[in-house]
Image: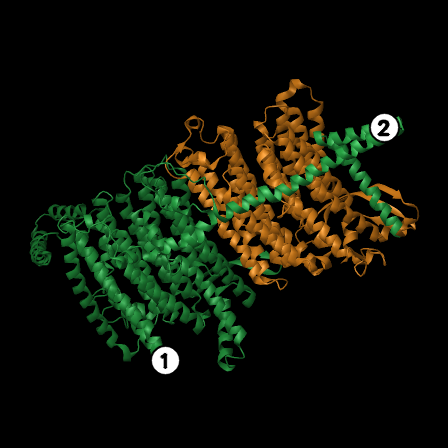
Amino acid sequence: MNSILLSTLIFLPLVGSLLILLLPDSFRNSYKWIAVVVSILNLLNVLAIYTAFDVTKSGYQFIQHTEWIRLKLGTLGYVSVDFLLGIDGMSMPMVLLSGIVMCIGAVASFTIRQRQKAYFALYCLLSASVMGAFISVDFFLFFLFFEFMLLPMYFLIAIWGGERREYAALKFFIYTLVGSVFILIVMIGLSMSVADPFFSDELGAIVHSFDFRVLANEANYLPDRLLHPDSTATILGMPAREFMFMLLFIGFGIKLPMVPFHTWLPDAHVEAPTAVSVVLAGVLLKIGGYGFLRIGYELMPDAAYQFTYWVAGAGVISIIYGALNALAQTDLKKMVAYSSVSHMGFVFLGFASVTSEGISGGIYQMFSHGLLSAMLFLIVGVIYDRTHSRQIADFQGIFGKMPLYTLMVAIAFFGSLGLPALSGFIGEFFTLMGAFQTHLFPSWVALLGALGIVLSAVYFLWTFQRMFLGEFKTKSEFVEKLTDLDNREMILLFSLALLVITFGIFPNLLFDITNETVSYLLTRF
Amino acid sequence: MSAPQVILSNLVFYLLGFVVFLAARKQLSDQSVSLLSLLISLIGMLLSLGLIVLGSGQSFSVNWFTIANHNFNFDILINNLTLLLYFIVQFVGFWVQLFSIRYMEKDPDFSRYFSYVNLFIFAMLGVVISGNLLLLFFFWELVGFCSYLLIGFWYKRPAATAASKKAFIMNRVGDVGFLFGIFLVYSFFNTLNISEVAEQATKLFADFEIYSASQQYSKSYLLTVMGLLLFCGCVAKSAQFPLQVWLPDAMEGPTPVSALIHAATMVAAGIFLMARIAFLLTPTAGLIIAIIGVFTALISAISAIFQYDIKKVLAYSTISQLGLMVTGIGIGATNAALFHLTTHAFFKAGLFLGAGAVIHYLHHNQDIRKMGNLRKRMPIIFWCFGICSAALAGLPFFSGYLSKDALLISAFSWADAKQNDVYFLIPLTAVFASALTAYYITRLYILVFFDRQGSTMKAIVQSVVNTYSNVRKGMKAVVSAEEMGFRENLVSNFIRSIGPMEAAVMVMAFLSLFLPFSLNPFSMENSTFETTFPVILSEKYHWVAYGMLGITLLSIWLSYTFAKEEVGRIRNETAVYGDSNWIARFAQNHYYINSLYRFIFVKPLIGVAEKVEEFDEKSEVLNFTTVSGVSRWLHYFDSTWLDGVVNRIGTLLIHFADEIRNFEQVIIDRSITLISEAAGRLGKLTRQLQAGRVQSYIASLIAGLILLIMLLFVLGN
């Protein structure tokens, strides 16, 4: 029974997608409901997994293993790609986050009016591939889902986006694609250097596997292969494994996004419709962080050690650079987009510390940012839906007119700037603590990172002051349009706010899950 | 009930108050909100008394969360310090809320106000009970958040919103230091539990005695840094130099809030924090702290002299008094500092509430040049304000005398022990700051309450005599009243004439007398407070108390003379607005520290500081779209250069593809038509890419790459 849960996460949305495609246009109004029901069922499924999750285990649980492709490569032996699903302390928080955010995104998509059939079919497709990426235990499978995600995402931005949607979508696409090429190289390199001990015995020939568990075990690496831990091979003057790690660093860094590979993000966000922004910031960025941890840190800890300066540096630069850019924005959505860059910087900073506080904090930060950025983009959506303006300067004193909305904005803003009792605090506190504790880089790096929490207070409070406080004032054509939240928006924002508060007060809800896996990961360093 | 249960149920009440008042602000009437809120505080006061009965020295711990093998607990630590502040916060909270009922009456956001106040008391109690630094920081930031909410309570006033933002950001700056102090404690002691840290630190300091300082250099250096980093939190929250500038601005909040948060409780949280971790402070750290404290006390006392806004005078006074407390912490006289914190909490709350009553009476006019003649119009406030002022000035028979002298005597003994006369600069500066205190509060009192014409002193003496006889008559009437009803009537009439504002101020004034603290009006020794928090006052410096008294009296006399002259100047309307004297202007604007910060931080960063911070009352529309400065340049770099490179690569690729297509068409068209068709198809493919049809491209790209890389590996082996 348990083993089906994971594959249901992938196949249920696929079925939903197919259903939407097959239903004739006369059922037009049911498309969105199908997407919502699928998302809710998926969330329930995720919650079932969450409750059944054994926190005392460090390895994968709920494993589902189906042999898929077994390709003979002549003298090279076999290549084996399996449909291998599982979940551990690293992926559980991400799966939980995806379950929540995909639900929110589905309901937020109700504002989509054109081509609903295509939209919701693609949305379900996206949902399936997001889940797939997080629960794959096979590198090849992970990569397939990782790549496949681009397809629905590209169309979601390119068809339902704003004015420059095609440019933004293509930019997003190509950027990520370049990143995936790097990851692809690493994938093939790693796989070609290992032999699955079990299947190799069985078939009497070397079986190259993509199984993360096989790739993580140094004993499985074939001697004198390129990526053997003791390999002396160099690529472009760098040790081969470090070179591969660098590829991962850039590949996932683009997705995260880290400065200077972040310029796709503001464009994609500004052009994407609200619900797509929610999913993009809420879930898709996390695949960068998750993948880097899962593949970079778990499979190549030795190289990760060598790169800690780079990773920490990228984190800190992203934090400060993103925050300063956010400060300069006049468009609310762009401000939120740059704040994402800044907040995701904490994730890399935490990972680079290679301490339990830093890595757990980084995972927590990803989770918390998922909730908060979803909230922030919904908030932008609320005002954009009403006025078709996102300019900060167009509004003043909204509090007087829309008190409930302002309350939600306050929770999202203060959560993002790291107020205790809201989830953002825990992530930032522990990533910084990890960065301070570590002996891998000097503690002033952490101090620079902390500059980010001052700057985030500056830009969030400044924006809050300008848009929401003061005497109510706006363009005359907006006055009538600015009405307080309707029920749907209320449910979305309120449930997210509740989660933000819950995870701000009870960090054990996630730390209990991640502890064993992170501790085990650290033993590999 | 055990102590933790008492505390938790108490906290739950406040939290409920916050949620209910905010959620049901439309349903609940103002009256029910105020009654409920007072009830919550009343219960809280009773519970805190119960807690005192249960006694100190209790701790309670439950696992909050775990990271790897590190437990982060929800620790409650109850010691005398906790009990003291736990009571003060709720006691002052109760009276301030009573005062607020009248002060905030008719405010459309009455319920929201009480909701915030409840959240504040909740958070402040959280700070006080926290037994570990993470939990303390947790509530610490929440307290700052409440302060943000309450300073900006009248959110339609631009100055209020700017002040609240400033307060939050400046506190953030200090909190970053505090945060790293916590990290350092954690990496040093491997725990954040205050009791455990104390245990280890005591051992560590014992080692200090054994080894010479040079051997332990790195450790003592780290400890000094640790102490100073933690002190950063105090610098921000207790408004010490260089982060003190938020507090005068915070006066934009409702006046009762200033009394509760920005005088009695929240700003004292910094002192509380330092008292909690006093065992961590090395002598070097202590010296630096003392210097900062005494410097702050001096500069803000000077600024207070030149203010024309009644609340600004009190704000600078608060900074100055906090500076004295910080000095006390720095020199190791923690208990003396705590004693001053306690007395200050009451008399400063009394002063602020009195000021609030005045402001309320004058319909929100805060300019002391336009006040005066209030003695007869608000007699109760006049007398109570006088008592609190006397306590602040440090006159005998009032609480301030006891605590200030304890601080000063300790400071002199500390300097004495240092064997270097330079150290006497600190107590001497403190003495000077105290003398200035007496000066500015006398000036304020005269400008606000005294008659602008005629001799007020004579009138006061006369009125004292009159009041005495009136009271005697009144008492006679009460005693001789034959019917109970009449007697009750008299009492209730008196109470009715008092009103909630006067009642609150009277209570604070009563607590500014010596009696609640010590039976001996001239010394705090052997008082209840002293037995709980022992203060060692060296016999050698007892003369300081009398010397200080002399200086204070002299200062009051000087102030009286100059203030009368100032009253005359104001009456003649000469030099009323804007001082010609540059020294006065310099001090009045608090040495232009604000402008300096704006110039070196805000302006380079966003470049619009002046427009946002200095709101022009007349111009209604704010022009804040013109962001410039570093952030703007960075964004220019980001959008034009960084993104430009990406776009350029994109265009180059497309050009390249076009060139290839042309090349192939030209070359191959001439040779074989068959292949030229294929080339045409390739061209179409590239065009498809430009048109955005990428799915086929991605498939072929991946397939191609996989093949290519596999080929490479095959060849490589």
Q: Residue at x 28, y 38 (%)?
A: B106
Quarter of the picture containing the C terminus of chain A is bottom right
Q: Residue B163: x and y, percent?
A: 37, 48
**Residue that protrudes farthest toward the top in the picture:** A26
Task: Determine whether B519 is above or below B715 in the image.
Answer: below
Q: Quadrant of residue B445?
A: bottom left
Answer with left or right where residue A98 lies relative to residue B563: right
Residue under the image location 30 percent in, 69 percent down: B430
Q: Which residue is mark 1?
A: B420
Give the foreground label among 2 and 1.
2
Under mark 2, the amino acid is Asp
CA neighbours of label 1 inside 10 A, class few (<14), some (14 to 19), many (20+)? few
Quarter of the image where one finds residue B529: bottom left
Rendering coords of residue A333 (x, y %): 53, 37
Q: Are marks 2 and 1 in contact (CB under 8 Å)?
A: no
Q: Chain of mark 2?
A: B
Q: Which residue is mark 2?
A: B669
Q: Tell which of B256 and B626 is nearer to you.
A: B626
Which numbered dot is residue B645? none
